[in-house]
Image (tube, rainbow, N blue to C red):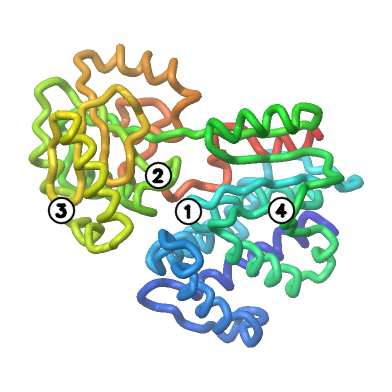
Amino acid sequence: MTLETKKSVFVELGKFLSQFSENNTLKNPAVLHNETFFDAFVDLIQLSQSHNGWYTPENVYFSIQSWAEALTEENLNQWISSYTIPNQEPKKVALILAGNIPLVGFHDFLSVLITGNNVLVKTSSNDQHLLPFLAKYIIVVQPELAGNITFVEGKLENFDAVIATGSNNTARYFEYYFKDKPSIIRKSRNSVAVLTGNETKEQLTALGEDIFRYFGLGCRNVSKLFVPKGYSFVPFFEAIFAYQDVIHYEKYANNYDYNKAVFLMSNFKLLDNGFLTLKEDQSHASPISSVFYEFYEDINELKTRLESESELLQCIVADETIENSVAFGQTQNPRLWNYADNIDTISFLLTI
């Protein structure tokens, strides 16, 4: 199968996904195989929260729309154009996927197939339905792909390389277990934001998207703020008030109540607006419903520190004061060429 054929399959998938949004799901008669898949996908989206309590329809629709926007011919061409992908005997690549946010492993799945390799997928117990459904769709679009895609429930066997994502604890297990295989082992990372005090209300409201999207469960969610000494959090709290409805979601509210109680019992000083707590803390990893913050005095010293901690960070949200930073509100909209942990997946797959 040619590279152009594979790209065309994912363009068709993008067209299929583009039909589904929270407020305007509309069947497009020009999309392939809607008679088989459209209504079934609507049902799956609505059932997702019963499979995983964090997978609200709003967040599943957001993930779907993000991939619909990514899977265009223009984006796929721009992504792949910088590589030379040979037509050679495919390798079998095992994927061990996380399940913290909907379709979190789709980029790895796409990367393996677009490079002409076979994918052996072990889904997370928290996300067992969305990716297999999309795999069925692309197989109907291009039946030749049926032999390239396998989902595994038990032990992974007979593979040439592995891409595994998990916590720091599971990563140590992965590193030992897969020590004899080419691998990408992803550990826990967090994202931070650097504020100067000159942000507009629009920027701070957009920062709320980086904090609250997927309830803060993703590695691209901002869990830590760096603010200048003497910073007033009043504008920040006013700007993120638009996200107050998050507290009406029971699982989030339970985490808010629990984590706030733990902090208060430990006599930590908190800033609180009724749906988010802010705690001064040097760690990057804050619990759900809380964001840590830390004061800085010299932006250049902070830059040096962030560079030294790069292996702990997924994204840095800032204005142009920080090199290679992400714009406010954009952490959950990576491009195809924005690789997790800054590890080029395509280059890895071309060397196995």
Relative to 83, is 149 above or below? below
**Residue placed most toward the observer, 173 or 208:** 173
Viewer-side residue, 195 vs 12: 195
Q: Mark 3 points at which residue?
A: 241
Looking at the image, which is closer to me, 223 or 78?
223
Answer left or right for 72 relative to 7. left
Where residue 254 appears, as percent x and y from the top left, is 27, 54
Measuring from the top left, give residue 140's x and y in whole percent.
75, 74
Q: Marks 4 and 1, how far apart in space?
A: 17 Å
Residue 115 place in picture, x, y as percent:
76, 47
Residue under numbered circle 1: 101
Residue under the image location 64 percent in, 64 percent down: 11
Crowd around label 2: few <14 · some 14–19 · many ≥20 (10 Å): many
Query: From this viewpoint, which residue is outermost toward the front?
Result: 265
Q: In this view, does 54 lie to the left or right of 205?
A: right
Calculate the distance from the C-alpha at mark 3 to the C-alpha at mark 4. Answer: 40 Å
- Residue 331's label in the rendered image is 2
Report whether 102 appears left or right of 226: right
In which quadrant is the N terminus drawn? bottom right
Amino acid on which the number 2 mark rests in the picture:
Thr
Question: Label 3 crowding class (10 Å Cα cut-off): few <14, some 14-19, many 20+?
Answer: some
Kindly report the distance in space between the C-alpha atoms of the residues bearing marks 2 and 3.
19 Å
Mark positioned earlier in the residue sequence (1 or 3): 1
Task: Give the mark count.
Answer: 4
Q: Distance between the residues labelled 1 and 2?
A: 13 Å
